[in-house]
Amino acid sequence: MSQIAQTPTVKETKAQKMERLKREKNPWEAFQEIREFARQGRASVLPEWASAYFKWWGIYTQGDGVGAVGGKGGEGLATEYFMMRVGIPNGILRSDQLRVIADIARKYARNFADITVRQNFQFHWLTIESLPEIVDALHAVGLSPKGACGDVVRNVTGCPLAGIAHDEIIDASPLALEIAHTLIANPEFYNLPRKFKISVSGCPVWCNYPELNDVALTAVRRGDQVGYTLRVGGGLSNEPHLAVKLDALISPEQALDVVRRVTEIFRDQQVLRESRDRARLKYLFTREGWTAERFLEELESRLGYKLDPGIEEVPPSDILRDHVGIHAQKQPGLTYVGASVLRGRISGDQLAAAADLADRYGSGELRTTIMQNLLFINVPAEKAIELTEELGKIGLFVEGSAFWRGGIACTGTEFCKLAITETKGFLRWLVEELEERVPEFTEQIKLHVTGCPNGCGQHWIADIGLEGKKAKHEGKMVDAYVFHVGGAVGQHAAIARPTNYRVPASEVPLALERLLRAYLAERRPEDNLRAYFSRQSVEEIRNRLSGTVTPVPAEIA
């Protein structure tokens, strides 16, 4: 008897599956399906929505608190709950919008929200039944979760002081908002290879970190001419890469067209769709051999015109960029007041109170920052101290230690299925420990905690970045952290160096105390952490973390 040969079934790769799902449906056109899930309950949610389509609406399934180690293939188990991220273009926010965010937090999200490192708000503990109600409430005040997640243009970030900073070259917020309104939720860009991050800044401080974005515009001046420098291909995660500056000066009139064409270049690169791990614009430079010259040539061919040559740009000096404190605006008699929100975690009650304070002491306008902080603007100078006191009463502090101001944390295993360690509670404890252990340290420090190699806590550009791992300690597997040092943006832009020094989470404060005390003992008069770390080898940093060397004062060395 003859046998018919069976053709083996070829299993789809992760990338192939996602590309097929995106070809089959634009989730922005299918919100009615989410409404139907809400009517029928959590069990009705289709697998393709849980794994993919929800993200286009800023929604992820929420992890079970164990993180990646509790599941398979590097992803943990999902619960019945959801996370939702809400885009705040350029971080510009009105008090009525903040009240809606506060109401959502209190009614649906167990009375808290997180400010993210892209000026968004993020909710947790949402049920399937609540999702349409939340989206409708957001839309009613001009907000949306569309594009806050997914393979799309993400929230467009910008300088939170746009329009009020003394030193800004141009108020770039209208451009940032125009880019957001043009590209986010645009069906032409619903199917990108992966996420695409845009930032626009009109000030010389670069507090929006243009070096980390897929495309970034930073304002420059040549005589009476104001334009933008263009950078492309920035990103962190597993293979961090600082954005490449192109030899071009972009006029304000050209800016939207340029950003759109760069987005099209990304969209059309089929090679970036072959692997989810190598699907960002930066890989054209790091793996596909593209140069700044080739990228500019491709861009100009799509624009149909040549761009003016670029000009020299002076990266911002080594200064604090968190905007915490009381500062004068360029408008006479007005100030802005920046409150440092440790970890970005804030309660719904605090948000509601903040909205009231913005109305009572200012113009009802607020800004979020990529340092996870909240700014109150247009505050009369004579009312700034009183506002500061009122903020303190609700647990939002305008003054804080260097560790409080510099602390950043990603979501961690509390809610994220990809995380390896808990981060939010750990950072709060770590800050308290360092304030007690090294109270004499008062300099600028960026202390970032990320729960996995994906780097949402941006440990690669921190003075000290802690990346979550696991380690065996006293016979048990526990949260642990590996140290990275010397990351920076601006004048000293650099990717942090891994030290390969790993300790259980409980031992991190002691290791940091040793390192910071060594710095205080050995620093030169002109030193800051960036300069000090740049002189140390990885072995020397490890020795200081472990305490195997005795610090030698600089005047003796």
Image (spheres, rainbow, N blue to C red):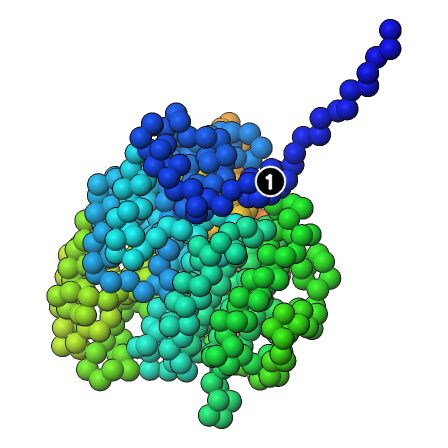
Q: Quadrant of residue 169?
A: bottom left
> Residue 122 placed where, x, y %?
35, 48
Q: Is residue 143 left or right of residue 175?
A: left
> Residue 398 placed where, x, y %?
25, 64
> Residue 380 placed where, x, y %?
16, 76
The quarter of the picture where the N terminus appears is: top right
Is 487 placed above or below 41 here? below
Check disc 1 and give the amino acid type: Arg
Is 270 placed above or below 73 here? below
**How many residues crowd around disc 1 within 10 Å: few (fewer than 14), some, or many (20 or more)?**
few
Q: Quadrant of residue 84?
A: top left
SS at badge 1 = helix
Residue in front for this viewpoint, 103 or 160:
103
Residue at point 19% right, 49% down? Answer: 349
Is 370 placed above or below 481 here? below
Residue at point 58% right, 65% down? Answer: 262
> Residue 256 placed where, x, y %?
49, 71
Q: Is residue 382 left or right of residue 226?
A: left
Residue found farthest to the right: 1
State the residue position of label 1. Answer: 20
Is 53 placed above or below 534 here? above
The quarter of the picture where the C terminus appears is: bottom right
Residue 178 visible in the snapshot: yes
Residue 422 visible in the snapshot: no
Residue at point 40% right, 36% down? Answer: 33
Residue found farthest to the top: 1
Residue in front for this viewpoint, 311 or 403:
311
